Image (cartoon, rainbow, N blue to C red):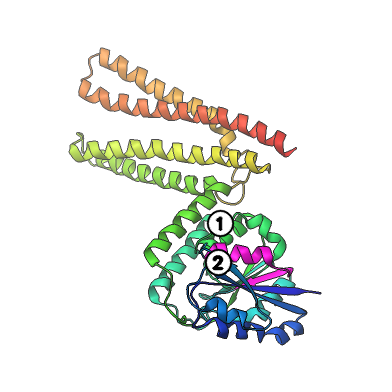
Amino acid sequence: MTMLTVVIPAYNEEQGIANICNRVLSVRDDLKKIGIEALELLVVDDGSKDRTAEIVKSMEDVRLIQHVKNKGYGGALKTGFQEAKGEFIGFLDADGTYPPEYFPKLCQAVLDGSDLVIGSRMAGEKSEMPLVRRMGNTFFAGFISLLGRQHITDSASGMRVFRKEILEKVSPLPDGLNLTPIMSTRALHEDIKMVEIPIPYAERVGRSKLNAVRDGTVYIQSITWTVLSYNPVRVFGFLGMFSLALAAIIGAGMVIARLTGVTELGPWGIAALFAALVFSLAGVSLFSLGVMFNYLVSLFYQRPIRQGLFGRPVFKTPLELKFGWIGLATLLVGLAVAVISILLGFSGWDVTRIWFYLLISAMVMLTGMQLIIYWVLIRVLGDLSTISVN
């Protein structure tokens, strides 16, 4: 018998809990039409101080689970997930903002082969979401899409249906309101088949518990840390490329200035040179660090190395395996510039000209040495990863 368990986390929701429970129970006939033969409704009362639990106890066909102390939105949902008897699990908020009448559509997508189906408030259906929250949700969805290489429109939606067996893959999940974006982020990186179904969104019953600034900050931090635990080069690689791009732009500007007749570096020129050197060295370091962390992640999860920056290999031989000879070549170029500069100094060149070339050579040599060090570390980690996977 195919069963859907719907979990409703509730904290001080006496105004709307009865209505949302009745609306969920009313979709049983529609669920049977698509092959979902049973519906289980769990309400997890998360330490409410009002009549929420009392109201739920008085309702038929609703199972109440109570927390003595408030554990948070995610904590309440996880309790419901553990207690769920159905092979499909759905959830939605107790405030009436999400339409339980759309559960049959979400379940149909699961029956058609999806593992996780999200009711998207941002995909075209009528939405009464406040502008600030709409902007925030658009940003978070774009942020996760950028880091995860799959476009999604509503990463934080609180109405979903998923196969119970994916819980092991998307865990651990946090206890706070950030459970939903973290679930989306983990699903993307665990190659879970995830789809979105447009749903309408209504004004909530009662006062919202969401704090845009506080919870938005938590969302960004938790999404970033989650991505770093799967695919560090996706974050560090983009930061490194951005840093190198800034260095290239500044360097191009200095070359153009030189070609147009500027022969001396003033205060702005020296500042630009300093910034270009810092950005270039930081870019190489960040990119290399991200690659090395990907090998550590592979070793931890005992799975093959992920080609994470662009989703597919750019070179036939991974770039990080070329760090050794690239670093050696860079080191030799920097050494050559240093030797030539010192010899020119002994031949009479003014020291105000030599310092510039010596500074450049020092940064180039340090970059080469860094690449060689990272190459050694990556080779060792690569061998260890291969052994652990086999």
x then y, percent, for residue 38: 75, 78
Q: Residues within 10 Å of mark 1 (few under 14, many from 20)?
A: many
Q: Nearer the viewer, residue 348 or 199?
A: 199
Residue sitting at x 43%, y 74% = 208
Residue for badge 2 = 152
Q: To which residue does mark 1 refer?
A: 148
Kind of residue at badge 1: Gly
Residue at screen point 56% across, 58% down: 185
> Where on the picture, by quarter, is residue 339?
top left
How crowded is the residue under tag 2: few (<14 C-alpha within 10 Å), some, or many (20+)?
many
Q: The C terminus is located in which quarter?
A: top right
The secondary structure type at the circle numbered 1 is: helix
Type of the residue with mark 2: Ile
Q: Give the camera-side residue of 59 and 201.
A: 59
- In the picture as drawn, the residue positioned furthest to the right comes out as 1
Residue at image position (29%, 44%) is: 253
77 versus 205 height, above or below: above
The x and y percentages for residue 61 are 69, 81
Q: Which quadrant of the figure has residue 189?
A: bottom right
Contact between labelled residues 1 and 2, with CB atoms less than 8 Å apart: yes
Q: Does the magenta stretch include residue 357?
A: no
Q: Where is residue 354 in the image (x, y as percent from the top left)?
A: 26, 23
Circle count:
2
Quarter containing the N terminus: bottom right
Q: What stretch is highlighted in magenta?
A: 73-91
| Disc assigned to residue 39 | none
The answer to whether one can see residue 136 in this image is: yes
Q: What x and y, as percent, mark residue 27?
A: 67, 85
Tag 2 secondary structure:
loop
Residue 341 vs residue 389, the one in the foreground: 389
